[in-house]
Amino acid sequence: MHAASTDAAAFTAWRSALVVELAGDPLLARLTASAGHSALFAPWLNPVSRVGFALETIIAKGAGHGIDVAAAAGRALEAAAASPSSAAWGESHTVLPLHALSDFPGAGAAAPAVPATALSGDTSCVLCTESLPGVTDASFRGPVARYVWDLSDRSKSRWIVPFGASGQADDPNFLSQLPLWAAGELLPVVTDWDQLTKETP
């Protein structure tokens, strides 16, 4: 699922079409009514997203409950083939920054605009950057930090965070690590007191 892969994009186009087909099955269609809550809760409340999360289980067991998975897969393939694209996975699989207080104006510091950042990876794979098949390819969830600790030589340890080490949206380094995080790269963990300086609020 490399960001530059057109095969990954083609696969996810079919997968999204399959999720939409399955969500429209008469046995599941009544669940598609909007819950009326914030987009922050869509991964948990949006019925199409729930079908996407349960896709492997529905494929494996749906037929036993009266869902014609094979027919849905065929229709999804036809739908995806009818709109072929040469786009790469990273063109649609980008960072989707959601904030818990986004529905409450004035609550917390305003974060700077996060640039469209292409992401490799997918749900449950290396560089896990989860999206909502059938809803959006943009990634709403990923690792908030990656660490590699070298227990024999602490100076060789590495780490990375997507939105700044301070945790403050107005920090000048809020986005400085984002490109490296998106690329799966790491930075040295500096613990030597001679290289650290105290910051004052």
Image (cartoon, rainbow, N blue to C red):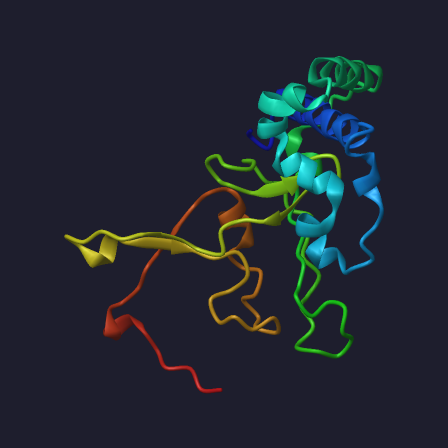
Residue 104 in sight here:
yes
Residue 188's quadrant in the figure? bottom left
149 sits to left or right of 43 = left
Counting from the top left corner in percent of width and height, residue 88 is at: 67, 28
Residue 136 in sight here:
no
Residue 105's quadrant in the figure? bottom right
Q: Nearer the viewer, residue 198 or 89?
A: 89
186 sits to left or right of 20 = left
86 sits to left or right of 53 = right
Q: Nearer the viewer, residue 73 or 117?
A: 73
Relative to 94, residue 7 above or below? above
Residue, far bottom:
201
Residue, far front:
65
Q: Nearer the viewer, residue 84 or 4?
A: 84
Counting from the top left corner in percent of width and height, residue 106 is at: 75, 79
Counting from the top left corner in percent of width and height, residue 185 is at: 43, 45
- Image quadrant containing the N terminus: top right
Q: Nearer the viewer, residue 178 or 83?
A: 83
Residue, far left:
152
Counting from the top left corner in percent of width and height, residue 121 is at: 54, 35
Residue located at (72% from left, 22% from top): 67
Q: How many marks?
A: 0
Relative to 48, residue 199 above or below? below
